[in-house]
Amino acid sequence: MSFLHLFFNKSTPSPPPAPPRQNPTAGRKIAIDASMSIYQFLIAVRQDGNMLQNEAGETTSHLMGMFYRTIRMIENGIKPVYVFDGKPPDLKSAE
């Protein structure tokens, strides 16, 4: 009989499973800056180093990213609200 056998005896009952963690944002509406999300997916989502494209050659990386992120949020009980904020303020025009 080994030393480890004393601690990992199969006849010893295992502890009960931990209760599922509660999502503090479940059931809430979350505002998301749509232009930043779209830009993020255009930069990040690639296949073999190229942006995802449909048969016509149009870029679809941003659509796939937004679609799957939205699904993941809804599955976790979050209600996403995408905000399209229009023209940038004058302070940003110098950048």
Image (spheres, helix red, strand yellow):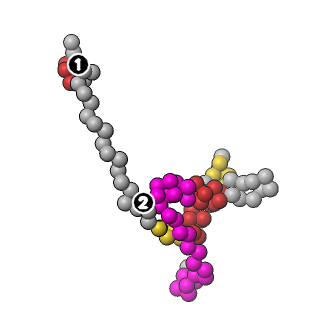
Magenta residues?
70-94
Quadrant in the picture for the N terminus:
top left
What's under tag 1, amino acid-wise? His
Q: CA distance from mark 1 to mark 2?
A: 43 Å
Question: Between residues 64 and 59, which one lies in front from this camera angle?
Answer: 64
Name the quarter where the C terminus is drawn: bottom right
- For the point 67% across and 54% down, the residue is 51
* Badge 2: residue crowd in 10 Å (few <14, some 14–19, many ≥20): some
Please state the horizontal and vertical placement of residue 16, each as a whole percent of the image. Answer: 28, 36
- Locate residue 64: give its quadrant: bottom right
Q: Residue at x 49, y 70 (%)?
A: 31
* Residue that carries the numbered disc 1 in the rendered image: 5
Q: Is residue 77 magenta?
A: yes
- Please report whichever mark, 1 or 2, sits nearer to the chain's N-terminal start: 1
Q: Is residue 56 above or below residue 15?
A: below
Q: Which residue appears at 78% of the width and 52% of the height?
A: 55
Residue 54 % position (x, y): 75, 54
Q: Is residue 94 visible?
A: no
Left or right: residue 28 compared with residue 58:
left
Q: Position of residue 63 (x, y in %)?
A: 65, 59
Left or right: residue 19 compared with residue 80: left
Secondary structure state at the residue bearing disc 1 = helix
Q: Residue at x 55, y 85 (%)?
A: 89
SS for dot 2: loop
Q: Amino acid at mark 2?
A: Ala
Q: Residue furthest bottom?
A: 90
Q: Answer whether residue 55 is magenta in the image.
A: no
User: Circle 1: is it few (<14), some (14-19), or many (20+) Cα within 10 Å?
Assistant: few
Relative to 7, is 18 on the left or the right? right
Which residue bears the numbered disc 2? 26
